[in-house]
């Protein structure tokens, strides 16, 4: 357009030609066009622009009036070059628009892809670890430390947080387990202490609900056997044996000494089944049983001492009164015999009978005094029986044998005295009246708790159980058997006699 205007100015408006030439030159040298000389600009565009600039000075020379025809001839060619340059510029602009469109589309795709990758990365590397942390915190909140592992691959703050949380949870779990173990230990200790106290309290209640006697010790051992699930338990000493349960040959034995202070009393043996009772429990039980046995033996000894003192007092009274009276009667009878005429046979016969009766009375008094003076030292009835047999053996040519099963130690003081005196009276009867070669004293204790004492001889036997006038041995034995809540039976055998005493395991009836 400017090219045609320059041609117009050259012919008709010369005064405007200079200004329009400057404007055309300014347009041709525009910075925008000069900036086309870049590596990324197509060579056609650059070449066309360079030809335009190179051809313009030569064409500008033909603008003079003299060269108007040359201008008219070259102008179409130059304009064509400008058109081709504009066309290339247009193509270049279109190319740039396509590049911009492709770049925009590529950028959009890249942005979307980046957004998706960012979302996926966020879900995998941020949201998922955070959800795992939340889940783990809920596990820990409920006291469950076995939460799913926290795996974070990236070296970032979440990995540090996950590692710290896992370490904290592990420490909490360790402390929690330690506290649980301590609670279990304390609970077990308290349960064991409660069981120990309960068993000891129950045993103490059994042993203190009345006077001590063997049945109470049997009850205590049965209670311990049931509560501690033992197979067998036995408490034994020199003068007693108590047991409960059945011996298990395959089970090991445990034992503890029974002693009161420095005084040994016996031994406590037991066998376990599944669980072993606590050592402290059995030690406390052994101490309680030892003290109870010691008290029981002391009480029996005190009762026996009281009975012995009472009988010694009665013996002294009999000796001081009845014995002196009998002695006085014997002196008077001697004086009477001397005074009566020797020819009075009837009177002398009466005096002789009276003398025999007096001698028998005196003999019975001595036996009665000996009976009252029988002693049972240290609550040992068996030793007293042996001592009594040794004394009676000196008075008889018959052999006296003594057999005994365990069970005498279970008798209280009054029962022991009754048994001792019944045995003595039965042995005396056999010695005096049976004319025996062998006398056997036997004691048995049945599983039902019945005590059986028998005296057997191989003598001449008897025809009747009625005692002669003035003899009261059988009557006394029967009364003592009744005081033991038992019975006395006298049986004739093919050769000899058998006297049997049976009584249950309960205290003797009080004396009236």
Image (cartoon, grey):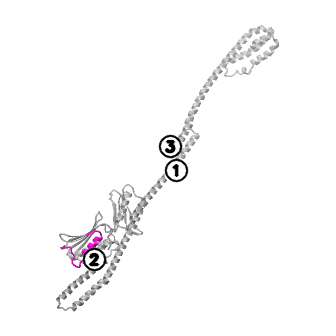
State the residue position of label 3: 147
- Labels 3 and 1 touching (C-beta < 8 A): no
At label 2, counting other C-alpha atoms closer than 10 Å, the crowd grade (few under 14, some 14-19, many 20 or more) is few
The residue that appears at 26% across and 80% down in the rendered structure is 364
State the residue position of label 1: 175
Percent position (x, y) of residue 248?
Answer: 33, 57
Tell me which corner region of the image, top left, top right, bottom left or bottom right, holds residue 426: bottom left
State the residue position of label 2: 391
In the displayed structure, 449 sits above or below 306; it is above
Tag 1 or tag 3, which sits nearer the N-term? 3
Tell me which corner region of the image, top left, top right, bottom left or bottom right, holds residue 90: top right
**Quadrant placement of the N terminus:** top right
- Labels 2 and 1 touching (C-beta < 8 A): no
Percent position (x, y) of residue 328?
Answer: 28, 87
Q: Give the range drawn in magenta.
A: 460-487
Residue 235 visible in the shown view: no
Label 2 and label 1: CA atoms lie apart by 79 Å
Tell me which corner region of the image, top left, top right, bottom left or bottom right, holds residue 244: bottom left
Between 1 and 288, the one lying in front of the other is: 288
At label 3, counting other C-alpha atoms closer than 10 Å, the crowd grade (few under 14, some 14-19, many 20 or more) is some
Circle 3 — which element? loop
Question: In the shown orientation, is residue 412 left or right of residue 144?
Answer: left
Label 3 and label 1: CA atoms lie apart by 17 Å
Percent position (x, y) of residue 416?
Answer: 31, 71
The residue that appears at 28% across and 79% down in the rendered structure is 368
Percent position (x, y) of residue 433?
Answer: 21, 76
Residue 300 visible in the shown view: yes
Tag 3 or tag 2, which sits nearer the N-term? 3
Between 52 and 492, the one lying in front of the other is: 492
Circle 2 — which element? helix
């Amino acid at each position: 357009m400017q090219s045609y205007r320059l041609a117009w100015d050259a012919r008709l408006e010369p005064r405007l030609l200079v200004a329009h030439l400057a404007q055309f030159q300014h347009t041709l040298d525009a910075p925008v066009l000069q900036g086309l000389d870049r590596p990324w600009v197509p060579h056609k565009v650059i070449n066309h622009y360079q030809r335009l600039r190179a051809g313009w000075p030569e064409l500008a020379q033909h603008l003079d009036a003299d060269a108007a025809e040359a201008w008219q001839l070259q102008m179409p060619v130059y304009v064509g070059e400008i058109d081709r340059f504009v066309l290339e510029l247009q193509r270049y602009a279109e190319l740039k628009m396509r590049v911009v469109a492709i770049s925009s589309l590529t950028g959009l795709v890249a942005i979307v892809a980046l957004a998706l990758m960012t979302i996926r990365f966020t879900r995998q590397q941020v949201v998922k670890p955070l959800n795992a942390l939340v889940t783990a915190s809920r596990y820990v909140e409920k006291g469950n430390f076995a939460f799913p592992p926290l795996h974070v691959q990236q070296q970032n703050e979440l990995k540090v947080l996950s590692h710290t949380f896992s370490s904290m949870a592990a420490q909490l779990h360790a402390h929690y387990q330690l506290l649980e173990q301590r609670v279990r230990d304390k609970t077990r200790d308290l349960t064991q202490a409660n069981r120990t106290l309960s068993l000891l309290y129950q045993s103490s209640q059994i042993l203190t609900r009345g006077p001590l006697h063997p049945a109470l010790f049997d009850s205590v051992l049965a209670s311990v056997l049931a509560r501690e699930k033992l197979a067998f338990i036995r408490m034994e000493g020199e003068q007693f044996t108590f047991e409960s349960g059945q011996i298990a040959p395959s089970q090991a034995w445990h034992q503890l000494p029974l002693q009161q202070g420095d005084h040994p009393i016996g031994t406590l043996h037991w066998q376990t089944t599944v669980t072993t009772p606590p050592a402290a429990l059995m030690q406390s039980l052994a101490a309680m049983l030892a003290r109870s046995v010691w008290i029981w033996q002391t009480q029996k000894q005190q009762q026996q001492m009281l009975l012995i003192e009472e009988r010694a007092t009665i013996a002294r009274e009999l000796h001081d009164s009845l014995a002196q009276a009998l002695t006085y009667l014997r002196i008077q009878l001697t004086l009477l015999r001397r005074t009566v005429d020797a020819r009075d046979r009837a009177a002398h016969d009466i005096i002789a009978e009276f003398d025999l009766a007096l001698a028998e009375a005196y003999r019975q008094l001595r036996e009665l005094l000996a009976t009252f003076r029988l002693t049972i030292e240290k609550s040992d009835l068996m030793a007293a029986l042996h001592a009594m047999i040794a004394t009676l053996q000196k008075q008889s040519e018959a052999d006296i044998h003594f057999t005994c099963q365990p069970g005498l130690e279970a008798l209280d003081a009054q029962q022991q005295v009754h048994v001792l005196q019944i045995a003595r009276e039965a042995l005396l009867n056999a010695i005096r009246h049976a004319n025996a070669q062998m006398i056997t004293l036997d004691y048995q204790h049945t599983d039902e708790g019945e005590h059986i004492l028998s005296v057997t001889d191989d003598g001449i036997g008897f025809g009747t159980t009625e005692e002669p006038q003035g003899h009261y041995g059988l009557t006394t034995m029967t009364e003592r058997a009744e005081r033991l809540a038992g019975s006395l039976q006298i049986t004739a055998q093919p050769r000899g006699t058998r006297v049997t005493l049976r009584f249950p395991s309960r205290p003797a009836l009080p004396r009236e």
